[in-house]
Image (cartoon, grey):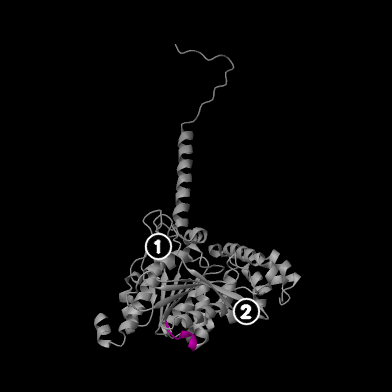
Amino acid sequence: SPAKLSCGADVRTISPEMPAMFDGMKLAAVATVLYVIVRSLNLKCPTAAPDITCQDTPLNRYLLKSCPILTKEYIPPLLWGKSGHLQTALYGKMGRVKSPKPCGLRKYLPMPDGATATFDLFEPQSIHSTGDDITMVICPGIGNHSEKHYIRTFVDYSQKQGYRCAVLNHLGALPNIELTSPRMFTYGCTWEFSAMVGYIKRTFPQTQLIVVGFSLGGNIACKYLGENPANQERVLCCVSICQGYSALRAQETFLQWDQCRRLYNFLMADNMKKIILSHRASLFGMSSSNMEAADLSHLYTATSLMQIDDNIMRKFHGHNSLKEYYEKESCVHYIHNISVPLLLMNSSDDPLVHQSLLTIPRTLAEKKQNVIFALTLHGGHLGFFEGAVLFPQPLSWMDKVIVSYANAICQWEKHRPQSQTIEAII
């Protein structure tokens, strides 16, 4: 007979439904995590070719045929490349996976107000396919310079394609270069970029120019070309990547939490604060400075780019208000004056550029024959990484597009007088 339990023993039985319930909870937790991962990484989102807006002209037909990369599917890395946040974060953190170190010469240009502009000059490593002398004049993003990884990668690739490269170092961006006047770069000041372009035109009288701007640099490049028709002389084309076109219209979107834009605003403001404070003696200590102790106090407590722009940046050029500063420094008021071929490129999942701002380049491309607007589904802000599953390639889709477009423009210009040849190509 079965053994009897001792008197008073506490016997507890586990219901057979309990393990099943625990297993169900585990499955639900795993499913939830997987759902969050799929949603946050946009794994179900399709890949596609860029959405192209342009008029039907012989030049645009030729460019789209000569740049198949613009009409083919852009495929980012499978596991994370469809997340605009990860594309942007990886660009911001490391720029590129492997960064070459092109050798160049640093040039110093004295400015009328006592400032000293600097840029780095890189000679081509091969003969251009047209045999011509062509220089890329490059304006980097906010607080960036020629030593940034994404700039190094693009310059190295361009050199190998036969381009000379001149890269502006935004005034105050290089940590080892002291300011010589109480002024640093701003959102739309074109003085330093103009000085660099002028130097290139004087030093290389036979060269033709390809103007390239990244993010804030795109605003400066487009504003420079549109300010004065003479600025477009010897310019073959302009390429602008991931810019926002209107600082005034972008101001409200940067205060929104949609796409974590408010967080990005805070992080960029913190970076700008560090750059300004690294030049505190020059910006606040010189006798010619119009900055006051109260401005420095406001800088310490600033948590957004708008607060820094209002208390510091607008005062470099004497703007009376933040609205006036944004109005006068945005390329949206000048870009329609550009007559050379213009490629504007943005990404739909760029967390820094709100979708409402993209009506500006789209409308421009619909109205002007010289403009092509390319909008990708993925790419983030200056990311545009390519790769199979996890690891991206050192060279980005963005780098390839810019050089491919520039090559096509150069070929068009080379053969433009030969109308029959061009018609045969088309």
Helix, strand or loop under label 2: helix
In this rendering, does residue 137 appear at all? yes
For this rendering, which residue is in front, 88 or 275?
275
**36 above or below 117?**
above
Task: From the image, tell me which residue sits under label 1.
Answer: 395
Residue 238 position in % (x across, y down): 44, 78
Mark 1: which amino acid? Leu
Residue depth check, mark 2 versus mark 1: number of the one nearer the observer: 1
How packed mark 1 is, by other alpha carbons closer than 10 Å (few <14, some 14-19, many 20 or more), is many
For this rendering, which residue is in front, 310 or 18?
310
In this rendering, does residue 50 appear at all? no
Range of residues picked out in magenta: 229-235
| Magenta-drawn stretch contains 261 | no
Where, by quadrant of the figure, is residue 411 drawn?
A: bottom left
Distance (Cα) linking label 2 and label 1: 36 Å
Q: Is residue 400 left or right of residue 19?
A: left
**Upstream in the sequence, badge 2 or badge 1?**
2
- Residue drawn at the location 46% of the way across and 62% of the way down: 101
For this rendering, which residue is in front, 37 or 195?
195
Q: Please identify the residue farthest to the right as the structure is shown.
A: 293
| Magenta-drawn stretch contains 230 | yes
Residue 244 position in % (x across, y down): 52, 73
For this rendering, which residue is in front, 231 or 351?
231
Quarter of the image where the C terminus is located: bottom left
Task: From the image, tell me which residue sits under label 2.
Answer: 325
Quarter of the image where the N terminus is located: top left
Q: Is residue 371 left or right of residue 287?
A: left
Where, by quadrant of the figure, is residue 136 drawn?
A: bottom left
Mark 2: which amino acid? Tyr
